[in-house]
């Protein structure tokens, strides 16, 4: 009997993929991705026109953002009842190609993570003092750990606090960084509002680690006070064996699996990356915290005291090059 080739996606199913991808987290909510649907293959494209020269000079955060979008894309396909295979691409624009396979049953885990996509938020505020159970903490680590990606609970918090305090002082005085951050927070409201950027009310006036982004008025507490605040947080450092584009992508996919797992368990979270772009910071972090690889992101999580609002999103049509969605008719 001749095997039946997998069917192409319908326009409605492509819309499901687009909505899932559009809700992925990204650096400064830049949404640096597009989708190219080619029959039973979907390319995830990196929009390199989205450039953050001060926050993300080497494009690491942009690639991790694409990794988060790739996780959402894969989950959407599985919830549509389709098997899929993900292959990393290292060419000019394509980040990965997802090949769509035959029908498959939807697992309870995939279903739960998919439905967490729409509820996931960046919570850049303090968490409640409710304790996160050890079993939940373990579930997050298991969700993110994969070949070449390691999740580490940071030790030596006194050293960690010194490094974060130093980073805060540097970033507060970096005029180029501050201009770029202001640009990506100024256009989310008012008559010139767009569908990207970080809403002003999503930011926190507190110090790191609560304030995910450092501004000119972000306070720098005493190192001992900051160490106490770090001890009160639930933190994971996402590390990779190396520092290639493929490993940045893998870090992003793992980070999103952790985040969706946390969301499914009624936790909130946010990510800190900007200190990691300072010259020498990551090397010092590896040395002082005795990390097993290259740190790519700091993930903080806990139970929210107040809900966070969703960030704006670009129109779905902008996810497709030249507006072409493809799909079976």
Image (tube, rainbow, N blue to C red):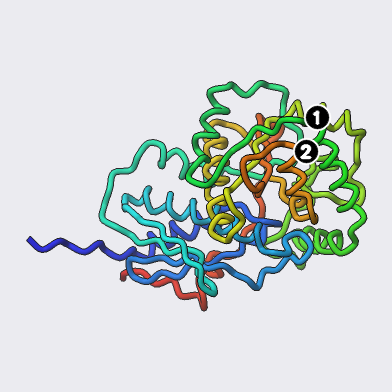
User: Residue 68: percent from the left, percent from the top?
Assistant: 55, 52
167 relative to 27 in the view: left or right: right
Q: Quadrant of residue 120 in the image?
A: top right
Depth order, front residue of 218/311? 218
**Which mark, by number, is residue 172?**
none
Depth order, front residue of 248/83? 248
User: Residue 173: percent from the left, percent from the top?
Assistant: 92, 55
In what element is the residue under mark 1? helix
Number of numbered discs present? 2
User: Residue 289: percent from the left, percent from the top?
Assistant: 72, 36
User: Residue 22: percent from the left, percent from the top?
Assistant: 55, 58
Q: What residue is drawn where x is 68% and y is 30%?
A: 234
Above or below, comparing residue 166 to residue 55 in the picture: above
Looking at the image, do the residues carrying marks 1 and 2 touch, with CB atoms under 8 Å apart? Answer: yes
Q: Nearer the viewer, mark 1 or mark 2?
A: 1
Q: What residue is drawn where x is 78% and y is 39%?
A: 209
Q: Which mark is first along the chain, 2 or 1?
A: 2
Q: Which residue is mark 2?
A: 210
Quadrant containing the N terminus is: bottom left
Q: Residue furthest bottom?
A: 322
Q: Which residue is mark 1?
A: 229
Above or below, comparing residue 137 to residue 2 in the picture: above
Q: CA distance from mark 1 to mark 2?
A: 9 Å
Q: What residue is drawn where x is 37% and y is 71%?
A: 38
Quadrant containing the C terminus is: bottom left
**Other-residue count near label 1 (Cα within 10 Å), few / some / many at <14 / 14–19 / ≥20:** some
Q: What residue is drawn where x is 80% and y is 29%?
A: 229
In what element is the residue under mark 2? loop
**Other-residue count near label 2 (Cα within 10 Å), few / some / many at <14 / 14–19 / ≥20:** many
């Amino acid at each position: 009997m001749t095997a039946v080739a997998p069917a192409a996606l319908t326009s409605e199913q492509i819309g499901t993929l687009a909505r899932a991808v559009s809700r992925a987290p990204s650096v400064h909510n830049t949404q640096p991705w597009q989708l190219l649907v080619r029959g039973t293959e979907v390319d995830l494209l990196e929009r390199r026109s989205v450039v953050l020269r001060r926050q993300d000079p080497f494009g690491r955060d942009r690639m991790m953002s694409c990794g988060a979008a790739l996780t959402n894309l894969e989950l959407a396909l599985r919830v549509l009842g389709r098997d899929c295979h993900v292959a990393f691409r290292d060419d000019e624009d394509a980040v990965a190609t997802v090949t769509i396979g035959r029908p498959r049953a939807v697992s309870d885990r995939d279903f739960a993570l998919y439905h967490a996509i729409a509820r996931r938020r960046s919570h850049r505020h303090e968490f409640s003092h409710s304790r996160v159970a050890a079993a939940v903490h373990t579930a997050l680590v298991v969700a993110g750990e994969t070949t070449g990606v390691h999740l580490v609970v940071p030790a030596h918090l006194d050293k960690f606090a010194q490094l974060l305090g130093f980073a805060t002082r540097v970033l507060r005085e970096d005029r180029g960084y501050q201009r770029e951050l202001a640009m990506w927070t100024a256009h989310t409201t008012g008559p010139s509002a767009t569908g990207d950027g970080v809403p002003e009310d999503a930011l926190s006036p507190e110090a790191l680690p609560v304030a995910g982004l450092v501004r000119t008025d972000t306070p720098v507490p005493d190192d001992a006070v900051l160490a106490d605040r770090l001890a009160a947080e639930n933190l994971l450092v996402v590390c990779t064996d190396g520092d290639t584009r493929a490993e940045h992508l893998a870090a992003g996919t793992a980070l999103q699996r952790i985040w969706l797992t946390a969301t499914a368990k009624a936790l909130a979270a946010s990510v800190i990356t900007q200190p990691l772009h300072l010259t020498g910071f990551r090397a010092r972090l590896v040395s002082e915290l005795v990390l097993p690889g290259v740190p790519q992101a700091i993930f903080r999580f806990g139970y929210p005291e107040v809900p966070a609002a969703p960030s704006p999103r670009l129109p779905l049509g902008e996810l497709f090059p030249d507006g072409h969605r493809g799909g079976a008719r």
